[in-house]
Amino acid sequence: MKLFDSIGRYVILMSRVFTKPQKAKIFRHRLFDEFQHLGIESLGIVAFISMFMGAVVAIQTAYNIDSPLIPLSMVGFTVRQSVILEFSPTVISLILAGKVGSRIASEIGTMRVTEQIDALEIMGVNSANHLIFPKIVASLIMNPILIVFSMWLGILGGWIAMMASKLVTSTDYVYGIRLDFEGFTIFYALFKTLFFAFIISSVSGFYGYETRGGALEVGQASTKAVVVSSILIILFNLVLTQLLLT
């Protein structure tokens, strides 16, 4: 029953979130702030993880090719498919669930326990729309950009690893990247990313908004937001993969 109660409160909150902003100028200002906080400030960790992720996949693939019948170009092909189909959209989204999701939940939760949200309501402001809607819109715009950036860096990281280790020539690696490329894989990855971005921002906003108590409860809300977002990302990853690739 507690699960259904949470789902019901989430749906009610989202019905308040997705309304027309009362002040377009304020919404634009908050939206650009969220671009900075949720997107640009995540570039560093996305870049670091993506480069090493691509490098590890390339090295592992190269070391496991022990048959002369398997061309070395399969290293580039494997890195490309692994990074685009799964690592960048799913793993990076899980990382963002921890970084961005915890920030959203703790920020809104702190505003709740310090009665700032109550003050907004007294002034006649739709606090759910004012606080959560810009974060959702910013996530839906910035997360796909971060994922495309991650894809490029992951493939680049694999290339750098091959050049440094001399396991595969640059020609073979680049040929593998271009081998049998299908644009649908990019669409599939970005389509998943939009779902994941909405899950991260809306679920984290919900747990932050529903916080009651003090500092301890804010920490608990942040933890719940990350855990639930991660579980939902994994579940929706399975569902969307089944729907789009089979």
Image (spheres, grey):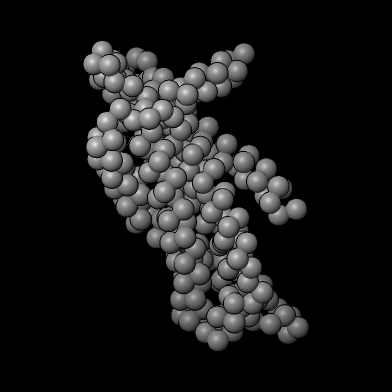
Q: Residue at x 60, y 18 (%)?
A: 4
Any part of residue 202 in sight: yes
Q: Residue at x 62, y 45 (%)?
A: 237
Picture coordinates of residue 58, whole percent (x, y): 56, 71
Q: Nearer the viewer, residue 182 or 78?
A: 182
Q: Residue at x 44, y 66 (%)?
A: 153
Any part of residue 219 in sight: no
Relative placement, left or right, of 17 versus 24 is right
Q: Residue at x 43, y 23 (%)?
A: 16
**Quadrant of the image containing the N terminus:** top right
Q: Quadrant of residue 137?
A: top left
Q: Nearer the viewer, residue 90 or 13?
A: 13
Picture coordinates of residue 186, whole percent (x, y): 57, 61
Picture coordinates of residue 34, whole percent (x, y): 31, 42
Residue 117 vertical placement versus 69 (above, below): above
Relative placement, left or right, of 188 versus 115 is right
Q: Quadrant of residue 101?
A: top left
Residue 91 vertical placement versus 111 (above, below): below
